[in-house]
Structures are given as structure tokens and as C-alpha cells.
Amino acid sequence: MGDRMRSGYPRSRPGGRIDVRIGIHVGECEIVAGKVGGMAVSLGARVMAHAGAGEILVSQTVKDVLTGSGLQFVDRGQVSLKGVPGEWTLYAIR
């Protein structure tokens, strides 16, 4: 599968590396017509939109849940998330 992916994606980096952006939020999800959805899923997508290539961003809620995990969080400041009221503090995971 890895070779197929590398050969099929011309934008991959030398050595077959593909940089991804990840956004994570935690909350209650809904199943509608067999698909996962709801505000928590939308928030995760909105958080991801602020991430750079190769970066994992999380919401304050995720940071709070992971207290004591040993992960290091870097404050990325407050942002507006499209379609979501208020300002949200995002953190990058190292």
C-alpha cells in the first residue's frame, strides 16, 4: 500500500514523505444516516484548518483532557473558527 500511495501522489516529498495536518477536538458525536457528524466533528475540522503541514493542533478541551499525559503543548493563541461562536485557544503538540 505504501508504494502505491507514493507512486500515486506526485506532491509527495522526496523519500515518499507526505506531510499531513491534523486537528483534534473531543466531544459528543452524532450518527446521522450512517455517518459520523455533529459539532465535535466540525470543530475538529475547523481546528485542522489552522494547522500547518506536519502539525497536530488540538483545542483547549483536548489539552484539558490530556493533563498529566506527558505530552507537551505549545500555545498557538486564540483564533476564530469558521461557523463557531467565540474565540478558541489552540495548542500544537510536540
Image (tube, grey):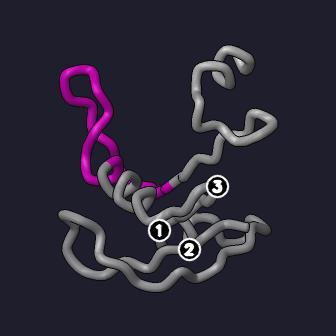
Range of the magenta residues?
Answer: 23-41
Please tell me whether residue 7 is drawn above or below residue 21 in the rendered image. above
Residue 31 x/y as whole percent: 27, 31
| Image quarter in which the C terminus is found | bottom right
Disc 2 and disc 3: Cα gap in Å? 14 Å
In percent of the image, x 24 and y 80: which residue is there? 86
- Residue 66 position, x and y percent, is 63, 65
Dot 1 alpha-carbon crowd within 10 angstroms: few under 14, some 14 to 19, many 20 or more = many
- Left or right: 23 as drawn, with respect to 92: left
Closer to the camera in the image, 37 or 28: 37
Q: Earlier in the sequence, mark 3 or mark 1?
A: 3
Label 2 amino acid?
Tyr
Amino acid on which disc 1 is placed: Ser
Q: Secondary structure at mark 3?
A: loop
* Circle 2 residue: 91
Q: Amino acid at mark 3?
A: Gly
**Closer to us: 55 or 39:** 55
User: Residue 54 bears which disc, if any?
Assistant: 3
- Nearer to us of marks 3 and 1 is 3
**Location of mark 1 (residue):** 59
